[in-house]
Image (cartoon, coloured by chain):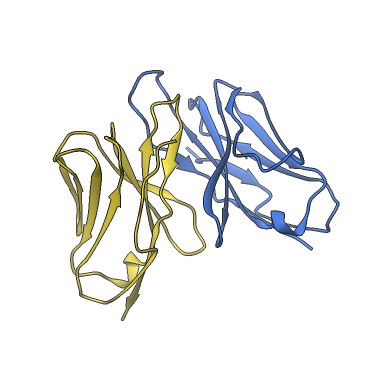
């Protein structure tokens, strides 16, 4: 089945630094979603990207869909301790309502 | 809206016992998903339903696991008999699916933390 890769699984940054992570697929994606899970919490939907090259912003978070629709990036400007958590990308497989989630990247922020 | 409701939030049981996890999806959603999350294996999809019908249960680990959705507002995940390796956080999620190629966001419940001793 369709898979998406998120590497690395962990990243540590100093508060105030920028952070970028990627979600990669070997096949063309119809769309991609991003979720955030705080420590001890549950995944929460952040954004959905559909169009090639699409860019969406949520405050300090910028999401981009690759031109070839095979990858996506999440960029956080000036990280804060509130950004800690695991960020998952998820893709629609085209089979009914199923989403396939990546392994996620866990971000820690040193104050 | 109260969001997706799961119960119990925590369950501690002994090996061999039956465990039943419950989920109430968001009203109006017609897709329901059961996930399991562990440190080792990450977030795994166990089974999902569309319009109360199981669509794909290929993620169910083995016959000890079963799931039902008797109506649009309730689903259960049962483990019988439970084993220590079943210890994990189990999430239920729901979404609306219009039947086309567009996907919709999933709303996750708070999860049930299961510990099997």
x then y, percent, for residue B14: 83, 58
Give the position of the C terminus of chain B as an image quadrant: bottom right
Give A32 or A61, whichever is nearer the viewer.
Answer: A32
The residue drawn where x is 33% and y is 25% is B102
The residue drawn where x is 46% and y is 32% is A98
Name the outermost residue toward the top.
Answer: B99
Name the outermost residue toward the bottom.
Answer: A111
> Image height check: is A88 above or below A111?
above
Name the outermost residue toward the front.
Answer: A26
x then y, percent, for residue A77: 18, 65
The residue drawn where x is 61% and y is 32% is B57
Left or right: residue A56 compared with residue B107: left
Left or right: residue B31 compared with residue B75: left
x then y, percent, for residue B91: 57, 47
x then y, percent, for residue B19: 77, 47
* Chain identifier matching the blue colour in the rendered picture: B
Write down the quadrant of residue B96 in the picture.
top left
Tell me the shade of chain A. Answer: yellow
Write down the quadrant of residue A8 in the picture.
bottom left
> Image height check: is A109 above or below B100?
below
> Image height check: is B53 above or below A39?
above
């Amino acid at each position: 089945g369709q898979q998406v890769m998120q590497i690395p699984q962990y990243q540590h940054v100093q508060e105030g630094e920028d952070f970028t992570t990627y979600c990669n697929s070997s096949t063309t994606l119809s769309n991609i979603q991003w979720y955030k899970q705080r420590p001890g919490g549950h995944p929460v939907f952040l954004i959905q990207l559909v169009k090639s090259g699409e860019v969406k912003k949520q405050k300090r978070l910028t999401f981009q869909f690759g031109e070839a629709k095979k990858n996506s990036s999440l960029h956080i400007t000036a990280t804060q301790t509130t950004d800690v958590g695991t960020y998952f990308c998820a893709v629609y497989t085209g089979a009914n309502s199923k989403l396939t989630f990546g392994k996620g990247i866990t971000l820690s922020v040193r104050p | 809206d109260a969001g997706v409701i799961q119960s119990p939030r925590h369950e501690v049981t002994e090996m061999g016992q039956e465990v039943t996890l419950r989920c109430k999806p968001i009203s109006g959603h017609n897709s329901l998903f059961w996930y399991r999350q562990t440190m080792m294996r990450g977030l795994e999809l166990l089974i999902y339903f569309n319009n109360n019908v199981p669509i794909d249960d290929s993620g169910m680990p083995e016959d000890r696991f079963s799931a039902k959705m008797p109506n649009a507002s309730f689903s259960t995940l049962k483990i019988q008999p439970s084993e220590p390796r079943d210890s994990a956080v189990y999430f239920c999620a729901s979404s609306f699916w219009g039947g086309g190629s567009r996907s919709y966001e999933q709303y996750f419940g708070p999860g049930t933390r299961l510990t099997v001793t």
